[in-house]
Image (cartoon, rainbow, N blue to C red):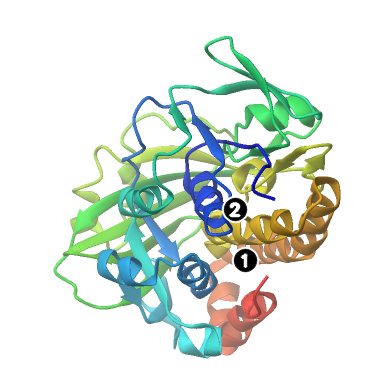
Amino acid sequence: MTTLRILIAGGGLAGLATKLALASRGVDADLAERDTTPRDGGTGLYLPANAVRALRDLGLGDELDRRSAPVRRQEIRDRTGALLTGFDLSEIWSEVGESRAIRRSDLHALLGAAAGSSGVRLGAAVTEARADGTVEFSDGSEDRYDVVIGADGIDSAVRRAIFPRTGRKFLDQICWRFLAPTGDASETWVARLGNRGRTFLTVPVGDGQVYCFAAINSASPAAPAGDWRELFADFNVADLLEHAADAYFAPLHEIEGADWVSGRVVLIGDAAHACSPSMAQGGAMALEDALVLADELADGPVPEALDRYRARRSERVAFVLEQNHRRDKARNLPGFVRKAVFRKAGVKIIKGNHAGLLTRP
């Protein structure tokens, strides 16, 4: 097993987690990252309990506890702040464990330090890949591997080369992300819902900061003209919006494709199944991908291992995509209907959204 030559394309969360998972099984995989320095940007990330479980399975529990903040409760409110439903997360996740939140840069640093620098090539993007394991790099060089793992994100060059008909679908939503100081010491995830799909989410990440995510329905993936913060002027978040002048903007997309394996090439994370953030499962699915793929490659041979990986992940990922769609539909209900639904059955709905994620992948 240790003689396999494996290349991971992409040094984000999925790529670093996969390198770490393989290393724990005695495999020092190569990793090619297009950036010339390790990633240190980004805003925040909510880690639901299955993501925290995966990070603990990677051996990162103690460091995660040091760098992140616990999230013990969720609340859904209307734009004025009136409570629609609220619950302790232990009601949702049962014995899986706690949920946490972290600055994205801290999670990158945590994973990067654990994965190490052996075999890491910075400034070397994979520009072309073939099913036989041959890859071309941005510097013009070419190599061949026993396994090529496409962990290069939603705009994956590996996916474009291997699955040219699999593209991303705009979800008719755009969003802004930023960090803001807060005097609120609560351990509560709060989503405020308005009309036109407007959502303003806050999650404490520790050290007096809160991660803010603002989204709105849009027919165009482009940023609207003017100051976007005016779109949320009727929300009770003016103190937070004061710190959002340089917020990170992004249109939201989903990958339309049901297969991630071709020959010796396999896709993971957003390259395989980018999805709506409604369930906050993008990072969790990437971390689970890393663990499952490393497990299967440890049992070889390669073709069968990749087939087993695909079989183990397909149903779970499909469940998350389905629940995302349900959550987005609920978020877009007329205000009076949404209020009645969440007040009457909010906890039951959220439990159902997560029921398929309680067991290990």
- Residues at marks 2 and 1 touching, judged by CB atoms closer than 8 Å: yes
Question: What residue is disc 2 on?
Answer: 276
Image quadrant where residue 352 sits = bottom right
| Residue at 50% from the left image edge and 30% from the top image edge | 222
Q: Residues within 10 Å of mark 1 (few under 14, many from 20)?
A: some
Rendered image: mark on residue 194: none
Query: Which of the two discs, 2 and 1, labels the residue nearer the N terminus?
Result: 2
Q: Amino acid at mark 2?
A: Ser
> As drawn, is 82 to the left or to the right of 7?
left
Image quadrant where residue 107 sits = bottom left
| Residue at 46% from the left image edge and 61% from the top image edge | 194
Q: Give the SS element for disc 1.
A: helix
The CA span between labels 2 and 1 is: 10 Å
In which quadrant of the rendered image does the C terminus lie?
A: bottom right
> As drawn, is 75 to the left or to the right of 281?
left
> As drawn, is 43 to the left or to the right of 185?
right
Question: What residue is disc 1 on?
Answer: 327
Q: Give the SS element for disc 2.
A: loop
